[in-house]
Amino acid sequence: MNDSSQTATLPAYDRSKLTPGIVHIGLGNFHRAHMAVYLDDLFAMGEGQDWAIIGAGVRAGDAAMREALRSQDYLSTIIELDPKGKSARRVGAMIDFVPVQDDNGPLIAIMAKAEIRIVSLTVTEGGYFIDPATGHFDPTHPEILADAQNPHRTAFGAIIAALKLRRAAGLQPFTVMSCDNLPGNGHVAQSAVVELARLSDPALAEWIKANVAFPNGMVDRITPATGPRERAMAQAFGLQDPVPVTCEPFRQWVLEDNFPAGRPALEKVGVTFTPHVHAYEAMKIRILNGGHATIAYPGGLLDIEYVHEAMAHPLIAGFLDKLETTEIIPTVAPVPNTNLADYYTQIVERFSNPEVADTERRLCLDGSNRQPKFIVPPLRDALAMGKTCEGLALVSALWCRYCAGVSDRGTIIAANDPNWDALQAIAIPAQGNPQLWLQQRSIYGDLAEHPTFPATFAAQLTLLRDQGTEAALRAYIG
């Protein structure tokens, strides 16, 4: 299909009639291709038009996004990368973006207004200040200590300040809705808000715990980073947009129906409301996100640029298939109205979509936050089931090898983790002493003391070191 002959579809409603109901913190690609699209669909039905989004951010980079979107009346270009032919739409669900300031004054002021009934977040897995060793909020994190001394500098500090103002004014609190890819994201968000409040105002912390809703949710849509390729796609649709979003056709959103201040009727546009979010979430985090980690590091070590190219490599595809079917999927509990084998087949199709052109480097990013969430939990469960876990051990060994910073053919791997220097300082000597890697308790907890896993991990890392990635994959696949 020739994109140059096409034009983007425009919002099918009068945007001047929209009024705000949601403040969203963290206007990245994922939010604009996910929640904003669902709301755009709802508004097009003539419903829920008092739930428009006001954008917000708490990082310096958010100011650049604000300026880019403000220059185009807060419209976002969303390009769906269907292998049968790309399509573009202009999503109009956002109507404003508050100025980004160090003290978050404008953000606090808008969240304190009565018409704001939901504050939603996409602040990344690492933005919740979780101690990986405990799985709980880390009150000693430097940003949290700074926020306690100079309040309101984090998203959670701003939320606390706004809730305090609403309580003083006698207004119902807004619902805090995490849209981040975390197990129990509502519980995690609640912990961050309540425990940060407790550092300075214990009574307010208890009031938040008793009165503010934090629904859990599972979100899913692959949205690659924006670069020259994506901007060129927007131009092919006749649009000069510095921040277009590309995404796969698939999207999914599963939510707990816990919105005391009200919510848009998102079930009318495909959102699943259920008390069993945890089941969907475990399925997605283990099969999809665990699958991403599985194909990321062998691809990185083999100098493969794109995810669909990794999926076309028979050893990587074979590694994914055996690992998922024998070690990961058996740890996933039943999910309502879902066949896990069919779900995995769909995941393979999504990863293999050449139009998405997602990069292996993006999948390799931030392993220190992602491995404890996506790989270690199924590893623990599989070990408890009596499995030897050679495949999950190989995923960890591949990550260790990647963090040593050199690919199989000698390419230097640029820093690709917030903790890259610390990881590399362990990964390099771990090539000769594999147990050093497992002694990172913030990642692996007590797995270094497990009766069998350390030897399994050591064997995989030694094989990688001595014979390379392809040999290790071939040996596992058998």
Image (cartoon, rainbow, N blue to C red):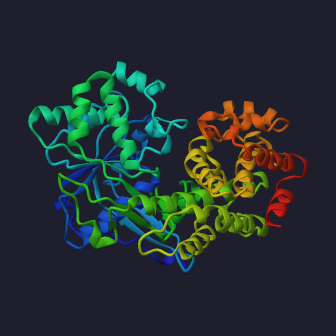
Q: Residue at x 30, y 48 (%)?
A: 214
Q: Quadrant of residue 254?
A: bottom left
Furthest residue in direction right, as rendered? 466
Q: Residue at x 77, y 44 (%)?
A: 401
**Residue closer to the observer: 467 or 417:** 467
Q: Quadrant of residue 194?
A: top left
Q: Residue at x 18, y 52 (%)?
A: 260
Q: Quadrant of the C terminus?
A: bottom right
Q: Is residue 362 visible?
A: yes
Furthest residue in direction left, as rendered? 170
Q: Position of residue 73 (x, y in %)?
A: 31, 54
Give left or right: position of 359 versus 160.
right
Give left or right: position of 322 versus 178.
right
Give left or right: position of 135 versus 24.
right
**Residue closer to the observer: 85 or 168:** 168
Q: Quadrant of the N terminus?
A: bottom right
Q: Position of residue 23 (x, y in %)?
A: 27, 47
Q: Position of residue 68 (x, y in %)?
A: 40, 48
